[in-house]
Image (cartoon, helix red, strand yellow):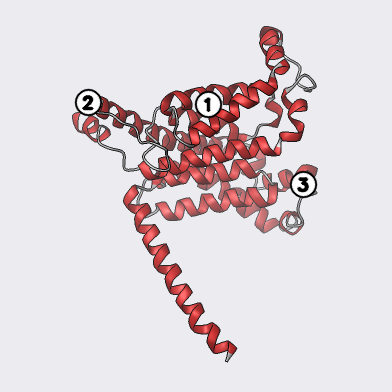
């Protein structure tokens, strides 16, 4: 226990991605508001089609009457969080506002929104201001630094464990579902008009029994074994690639965009600062070699 406590009290080795993820969350929230901008009155205002329940009728009606002020304050908190202003206080207020906005209209939510509010809650306890922030978190006393490191490490592992639990529960529910167990689930899902009329990619996929059966079982197996295999360092890139491929399929075939991208971005927490910096160096070297290759080939073709 002492060794575990000592490990958790060390400075987080995910500080780079914590800062990147903070920016992505802000971009995600602002983008969602921008896409809903012309329909805010219908979604959250007095013209909303959501009927408040009796036990929270007064609070919902009050928020609907003042939805412009709520959205304005919500946007201010998103911008402040993006610049790292207010640190933990801003993150916690943003978490409360996300819950309020989601409660105002649950019909426009998807599976990613449920995870989203927990991600923001975890970030409210993490020091995600080391990079891309107007100012770093300044802690002078030793015990406050250790406490900050402990909360940050626990927040990161909470995000990863939460993600694993989501996949495992999803995989278990699919494994005990007759339609998934028979391998025909994707056929029925993608035959729904909501998905079937969105893209031309659906038709050749749905009418191929081998593909439908393979990806139905592929989805179950990957979700069930993800929580175990992803912690094996050698298998991690392969497992994350499989899950990213699954979410990209959801993105293009089912057009559930925010959900898919949000889950893929969480995968970055599986990589430490040194691994990210190593990847950055390799990317820079690869880009330099590619540019040299282009420069060598262009004059030859022109001559």
Rendering coords of residue 260 (x, y %): 59, 44
Rendering coords of residue 296 (x, y %): 48, 83
Where is 182 relative to 114, above or below?
below
First along the sequence among labels 3 and 1: 1
Q: Residue at x 54, y 21 (%)?
A: 96
Label 2 to label 1: alpha-carbon separation:
28 Å
> Label 3: which residue?
191
Q: Secondary structure at mark 1?
A: helix
> Label 1: which residue?
94
Q: Residue at x 47, y 23 (%)?
A: 92
Front-most of residues 81 and 134: 134
The answer to whether residue 102 is seen in the rendering is no
Mark in front: 3 vs 1:
1
Q: Residue at x 73, y 44 (%)?
A: 188
First along the sequence among labels 2 and 3: 2
Label 3 to label 1: alpha-carbon separation:
38 Å
- To which quarter of the image does residue 148 belong? top left
Graded by Cα atoms within 10 Å as few (under 14), some (14 to 19) or many (20 or more), the crowding at tag 1 reads many
> Label 2: which residue?
141
């Amino acid at each position: 226990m002492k060794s575990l406590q000592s490990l958790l009290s060390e400075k987080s080795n995910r500080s780079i991605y914590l800062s990147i993820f903070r920016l992505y969350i802000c971009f995600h929230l602002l983008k969602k508001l921008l896409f809903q901008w012309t329909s805010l009155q219908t979604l959250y205002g007095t013209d909303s089609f959501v009927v408040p329940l009796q036990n929270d009728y007064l609070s919902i009606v009050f928020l609907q009457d003042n939805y412009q002020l709520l959205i304005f304050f919500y946007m201010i908190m998103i911008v402040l969080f993006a610049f790292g202003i207010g640190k933990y206080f801003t993150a916690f207020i943003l978490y409360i506002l996300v819950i309020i906005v989601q409660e105002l209209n649950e019909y426009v939510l998807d599976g990613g929104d449920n995870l989203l509010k927990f991600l923001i809650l975890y970030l409210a306890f993490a020091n995600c201001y080391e990079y891309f922030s107007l100012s770093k978190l300044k802690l002078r006393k030793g015990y406050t630094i250790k406490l900050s490191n402990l909360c940050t490490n626990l927040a990161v592992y909470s995000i990863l464990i939460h993600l694993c639990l989501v996949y495992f529960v999803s995989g278990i529910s699919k494994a005990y579902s007759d339609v998934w167990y028979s391998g025909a689930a994707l056929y029925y899902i993608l035959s729904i008009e909501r998905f079937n009329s969105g893209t031309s990619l659906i038709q050749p996929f749905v009418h191929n029994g081998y593909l439908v059966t393979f990806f139905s079982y592929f989805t179950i197996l990957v979700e069930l074994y993800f929580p175990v295999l992803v912690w094996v360092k050698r298998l991690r890139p392969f497992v994350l690639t499989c899950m990213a491929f699954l979410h990209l399929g959801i993105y293009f075939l089912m057009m559930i965009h925010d959900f898919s991208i949000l889950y893929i971005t969480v995968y970055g927490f599986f990589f430490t600062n040194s691994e990210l910096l190593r990847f950055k160096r390799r990317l820079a070297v690869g880009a330099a070699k590619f540019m040299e290759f282009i420069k060598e080939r262009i004059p030859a073709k022109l001559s």
